[in-house]
Image (cartoon, coloured by chain):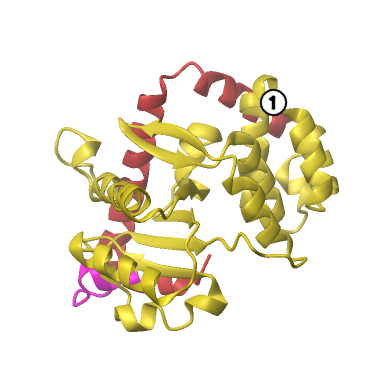
Chain colours: A red, B yellow
Amino acid sequence: MTERTITDLQVKMKAVSTIPQDMQTQIFFDMCEFGRRLYMQTEQERFPNKNKVTIMRDYYLARGNH
Amino acid sequence: MVTIEGDHFMSTPFFQAFVEIITLFEELESNHNLPYMLIGGILTPIYAESRQTQDVDVLAHIQVNENNKNVLINTFEKLKFQPVLSWRDTFLDWKSLKYIQFFDRTGLVKIDLILLDPSYKGKNIREKMKILTFYNRVRISIQGTDCWATSKEDFILSKLVYGGYQDYKDALACWIRYNQELDTKYLERNAINLQIEQEFKYILQMIPADKAFPGE
């Protein structure tokens, strides 16, 4: 299991190094945006009266100062 | 169904916020001699394994005084950054906390601004690490936006100093990704200085995070 985890990471990093850096950062920003929207959608369904800014501020508050 | 609308990520609030954050810190550095560098999760697509983050961490050499406080507030307001509550509250404990938090123009992206005290002579490893890494900062480009960032070696060291499960994973990914081009002697020397020899040994041996941090 341990060897498998490291091998997976090595293969992943090798694959990543073949992708142009701009594409990697593009995927990163897309991923962050997707995560934020998914969270926002879930929270808006739970709390329809909360606006986007309040949702994000509550999110940061819940995470603490990490 | 959640989708990324529009034809490009460059229209997303997170990317726009990133560009505005860099504009802010470039202005503070060039106009007010307050140097900065990016640290943390925002660097994972370049240095390690991309992972989601919702905030931007910045380390800056800003002395805690009234003049710098006014410079910061004026620049934040000019560029439409937002306080968590008020700017007065933001700076209430900045001397003891050594960081401040605020939001981008949209109020959706949080910026953690960590303050560097170069005159620090104490034994706190995190403070020592900030000083060590800051003066090795490097110029990088993220989607055409030039900015200052911590170096790859210092990315690993600082992750090991912070010592969490995710931090270790980031450090390990960076080590595996850039193994051949990293300054190993620098890493070894400073792992001793920063009292993270054991953690660095785990990295050298490529011990997975779940084994290095059992139970986390």
Q: Chain of mark 1?
A: A
Q: With respect to residue B184, does B202 lie above or below?
A: below
Mark 1 element type: helix
Tell me where the magenta segment starts and ends, as one range: A46-59
Residue A58 quadrant: bottom left
Say whether residue A19 is magenta: no
Pick the front one: B56 or B78 = B78
Rendering coords of residue B137 (x, y %):
54, 40
* Amino acid at the residue labelled 1: Thr
Pick the front one: A4 or B166 = B166
Q: Residues within 10 Å of mark 1 (few under 14, many from 20)?
A: few
Q: Residue furthest top?
A: A18
Which residue corresponds to the image point at 54% horizontal and 42% vertical from the top-left?
B150
Q: Which residue is mark 1?
A: A7
Which residue corresponds to the image point at 79% horizontal and 45% vertical from the top-left?
B191
Rendering coords of residue B170 (x, y %):
61, 42
**In screen coordinates, is B172 left or right of B41?**
right
**In screen coordinates, is B55 left or right of B4?**
right
Q: With respect to residue B216, does B15 lie above or below?
A: above
Pick the front one: B117 or B170 = B117
Residue A53 quadrant: bottom left
